[in-house]
Image (tube, rainbow, N blue to C red):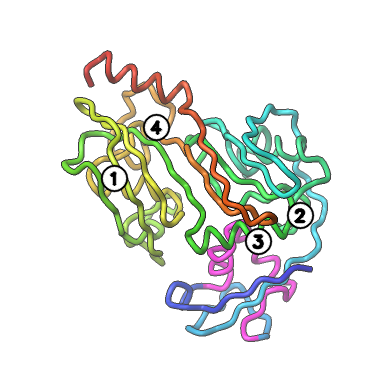
Amino acid sequence: MDKLDFFADEEYAGIRADKAVSMFEPSLSRSAVQKLLEKGLVTVGGKPQSKNYKLKYGDKIEITLPEPEPTDIRPMNIPLDIFYEDADLLVVNKPKGMVVHPAPGHYDDTLVNALMNHCGDSLSGINGEIRPGIVHRIDKDTGGLLMVAKNDAAHIALAEQIRDHSFRREYRAVLCGNPKEDMGVVDRPLGRHPYDRKKQTIGGVNPRDAVTRWAVLERYRYFCNVKCVLETGRTHQIRVHMLSIGHPVAGDTVYGGEKNDFGLRGQCLFAAVLGFTHPSTGKYMEFEAPLPRWYTDFIDRIKRSNW
């Protein structure tokens, strides 16, 4: 069994144990953490606690990861655009519109279904099941590069890089309007929206530090093409941060505040660059995916229509 541990600092103090653990290790869902708590595999100060226990500053939390069990996720023969693969990991170019994990309403045709078919028995069990370890996620309607761990050691090492902010993630986005500046930094904490659990907002419930660096690549009449570099990786970070400066991502009907009249299916946001230190070799690796057709077609339409 593998073990993880951390101390409750200002970020985790006052938060329920199940949420704090899933925040510390994003690959563990709240339901998975609750199962670990029920089995006594998550301890606080050496003692088992309930999911409702609120952490105190300085608490030491230890997580014991059980041996993985078979999963009921169905392998599916779905083509994968694999940028890199070795015994430890894969870098996959996820298409726009594909869900990453099976969930209610999306049990099939997800990236994990495709990975189950591709990887066979070579899978990470960090989630408590024999399944690919999704180290970080991108939204359904955001396409681009995604990291997948094939064993627990790789998963833990890569997740640590994300927590240490040494994992490079660079996005391309088309924004509504044109910022006055050519570049900037949004340093505003994000938390769950108090009235809509599916949304994030500046501040919000249990806010966490969030930093996005952006730069304009090309300006149009009513839009601009930008790059966004994440220093942190919070849920919907770029979408909420760009909205906060008055320039929501084009096509984002959740955070755009307007009807999608741009011919887009969801936000015009693409995870273009992924950089990390390989967990076995210690060498830095970086990959860049070309902009997909739906993205370049939208820019062409902007130019033709003088938007």
Residue at the location (47% across, 78% down)?
Answer: 9
Asked if residue 226 lies left or right of residue 288, the reply is: left
Residue marked by disc 3:
156
* Label 2: which secondary element: loop
Disc 3 marks which amino acid? Ile
How far from the left and from the top, in percent, is residue 98? 57, 33
How far from the left and from the top, in percent, is residue 295? 42, 25
Please tell me whether residue 237 is drawn above or below residue 248 in the rendered image. below
* Label 4: which secondary element: loop
Residue at the location (78% across, 49% down)?
Answer: 71
* Label 1: which secondary element: helix
Instruction: Nearest to the eye among marks 4 and 3: give it.
Output: 3
The answer to the question of whether label 2 and label 3 lie on touching residues, with beta carbons closer than 8 A, is no
Asked if residue 86 lies left or right of residue 241, the reply is: right
- When asked about the image quadrant of residue 59, the answer is bottom right
Labelled disc at residue 268: 4
The local crowd at label 3, few if under 14, some if 14 to 19, many if 20 or more residues have their Cα within 10 Å, is many
* Image quadrant occupied by the C terminus: top left
Disc 2 marks which amino acid? Glu
Please tell me whether residue 105 is drawn above or below residue 58 in the rendered image. above
Give the CA separation, mark 4 to mark 3. 31 Å
Residue marked by disc 2:
129
Asked if residue 86 lies left or right of residue 5, the reply is: right
Give the residues drawn in magenta, as a range. Answer: 16-45
Disc 4 marks which amino acid? Cys
Labelled disc at residue 243: 1
How far from the left and from the top, in percent, is residue 290? 49, 28
Disc 1 marks which amino acid? Leu
How far from the left and from the top, in percent, is residue 191? 39, 60
Give the CA separation, mark 1 to mark 2. 37 Å
- Judging depth in this view, the residue of 171 and 8 nearest the camera is 171
Q: Is residue 200 magenta?
A: no
